[in-house]
Amino acid sequence: MSEVINSNFKSAFDLYDLETEAIPKLLHPFLQKVGLASLVGTSDSGKSTFLRQLSLAIVFKQETFLGFKIDGTTHKVLYVSTEDDANAVSYAIRKQVNQLYYENDSLEKSLLKNLEFLFETENLLSELKYKLENDPVDLIVIDAFTDVFTKELNSNIQVRQFLNEYDKLAKSYGCLILFLHHIGKSTMRNTPSKDSIIGSQAFEAKMRVVLEIRPHKYNTNFKDLWVLKANFLEAKLKAKSSVLAMDENLIFYNTGEKSEKNYIAKTNNTQLIEKVLALYREGHSFRKIEEMLKDTEFKISKSAVAEIIKKYSN
């Protein structure tokens, strides 16, 4: 009688029989429940503030974050902080929590115990494994990648080997690990792209999702949230950003506005430029011009209208 050997292989029939119709999400439609993801941006874009607010929304069991649905399981988050110490995080998170509580006094502050911070990163992988063994979480934030990855940033092999271990960890314990990472400051004048991420291309390749926060082109109080990579998303969701505002209490809000990724190409279109300038000279606002051209071949966003008028109105 032959011995039965356990196998890691799964047949196509087994996978078909799972009846998976959509990738399970932690934050709809952007962030998957399991695997690796990243939030990138320049050093002054508010990445850490954004991620702390997301973490609070998860542990407070809020239904949405910036209008996007949260689908938590444990409603617990681990936050690895390498750039801010305990005092800096205490200051920032108190402002955020107090503002959230002011807006919704039914929040249970005791749930803050489900958001834990780690400031020491020696033996980080082992620390996380030990923690998850006894206390599973929805999300692990690693802020920032370049502080926990100590090898050659431009080495595809070393970056991939490092991230493989975290990918295994995420899949073993059914959670999302989200790395904060940086883009080059010189790339800010370019269209948002995953090619702007510093270091090896292996970093981006290993991520299932890459989001970017960057300062808004026309309003210093606004930020653009772009989806640079998400293979399971429709292309139209990657073509426009969500425009966010941040208040003095370090809370982001979704303005409902959108920015177009292809505004650079549109603002070099001669016929479109002439059309926009003509409507502007007639006294129409940026928003009105956007509405008037919506169902024409010259469809354009309000931000692209503003760019054209800024460049050519004289």
Image (spheres, rainbow, N blue to C red):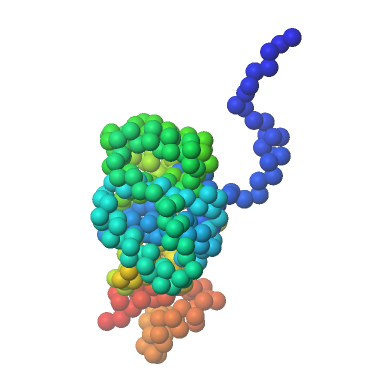
Position of residue 280 measured from the top left corner of the image (x, y, whole percent): 38, 85
User: Which residue is located at x 71 percent, y 34 percent?
Assistant: 13
Of 104 and 265, the residue lying toward us: 104
Residue 109, above or below 148: below
Corner quadrant of residue 252: bottom left
Q: Can the viewer see residue 233?
A: no
Residue 269, above or below 212: below
Of 245 and 133, the residue lying toward us: 133
User: Which residue is located at x 38 percent, y 57 percent?
Assistant: 52
* Count of numbered badges drawn on the protein: 0
198 with respect to 241 (left or right) = left
User: Which residue is located at x 50 percent, y 52 percent?
Assistant: 75
**In this view, which residue lies farthest toward the right?**
1
Quadrant of the image for the C terminus? bottom left
Q: Can the viewer see residue 215?
A: yes
Of 36 and 292, the residue lying toward us: 36
**In this view, which residue lies farthest toward the top?**
1
243 with respect to 154 (left or right) = right
Corner quadrant of residue 5: top right
Of 189 and 204, the residue lying toward us: 204
